[in-house]
Image (cartoon, rainbow, N blue to C red):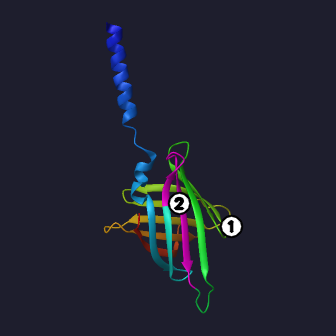
């Protein structure tokens, strides 16, 4: 009888522990979906869209981005496409790898706050440090800012925009 009671307690305790595990995607939920927006910066004024979607049985998040900057008298039209894979590292922290149509490959460490996600690359040799920030605004739109730093401390905004969720 004692063995049955102890066994029942162990089964209940273990099921309670496993049932309450937070999902890796929970902290990304506000950013998951399809977005479109406008912004400006070094390449000029532009428009774009991106998605943050769970993939591989919700083990990773795949971000696809497309932006266009029209030609000006000084610059040709720019079309920028990129892909980012966000995934948990061995410790469970989020990291990301980014690829774009210009040949860039960037590894990011990801920091989460209540309504902000900051992705920042490490300083390596003579390469600049990149920082990509998503901030949820009160009207449920988001501010997206991409910054570059030569020293890893003093960042200059390269692009800055506002996006709305369409799905």
In three-dimensional space, the C-alpha distance between marks 1 and 2, rounded to whole angstroms, equals 17 Å
* Residue 150 shows in this picture: no
Front-most of 16 and 47? 47
- For the residues carrying marks 1 and 2, which lies nearer the camera in this image? 2
Q: Quadrant of the N terminus?
A: top left
Q: Residue at x 48, y 59 (%)?
A: 52
Tell me the quarter of the picture where residue 33 sits. bottom left
| SS type, badge 2 | strand
Front-most of 13 and 60? 60
Which of disc 2 and disc 1 is earlier in sequence? 2
View extreme (top): residue: 1
Q: Residue 150, position in %: x, y?
A: 60, 70
Q: Which residue is mark 2?
A: 63
Tell me the quarter of the picture where residue 5 sits. top left
Q: Residue 35, position in %: x, y?
A: 45, 67
Q: Residue 165, position in %: x, y?
A: 40, 66
**CB contact under 8 Å: marks 1 and 2:** no
Specify whether 18 is left or right of 155: left
The stretch of residues the image draws in magenta is: 52-70
In the image, is residue 54 part of the stretch drawn in magenta? yes
Q: Residue 103, labelled with which disc? A: 1
User: Few, some or many C-alpha atoms within 10 Å of disc 2 (few <14, some 14-19, many ≥20)?
Assistant: many
Tell me the quarter of the picture where residue 103 sits. bottom right
In the image, is residue 153 part of the stretch drawn in magenta? no
Front-most of 126 and 72? 72
Specify whether 107 is left or right of 159: right
Q: Is residue 40 above or below residue 36?
A: below
User: Few, some or many C-alpha atoms within 10 Å of disc 1 (few <14, some 14-19, many ≥20)?
Assistant: few
Q: Residue 23, position in %: x, y?
A: 42, 44
Q: Quadrant of the C terminus?
A: bottom left
Q: Considering the whole magenta stretch, tell me its main secondary structure.
A: strand
């Amino acid at each position: 009888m004692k063995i049955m009671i102890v066994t029942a307690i162990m089964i209940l305790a273990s099921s309670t522990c496993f049932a309450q595990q937070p999902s890796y995607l929970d902290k990304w939920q506000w950013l998951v979906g399809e977005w479109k927006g406008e912004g400006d910066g070094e390449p000029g004024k532009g428009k774009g869209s991106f998605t943050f979607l769970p993939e591989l049985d919700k083990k990773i998040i795949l971000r696809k981005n497309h932006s266009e900057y029209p030609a000006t008298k000084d610059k040709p039209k720019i079309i920028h496409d990129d892909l980012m894979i966000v995934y948990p590292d061995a410790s469970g922290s989020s990291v990301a790898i980014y690829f774009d149509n210009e040949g860039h490959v960037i590894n990011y460490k990801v920091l989460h706050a209540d309504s902000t996600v900051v992705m920042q690359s490490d300083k390596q040799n003579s390469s600049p440090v990149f920082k990509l920030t998503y901030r949820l605004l009160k009207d449920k739109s988001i501010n997206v800012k991409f910054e570059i730093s030569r020293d890893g401390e003093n960042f200059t905004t390269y692009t800055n925009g506002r996006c709305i969720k369409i799905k």
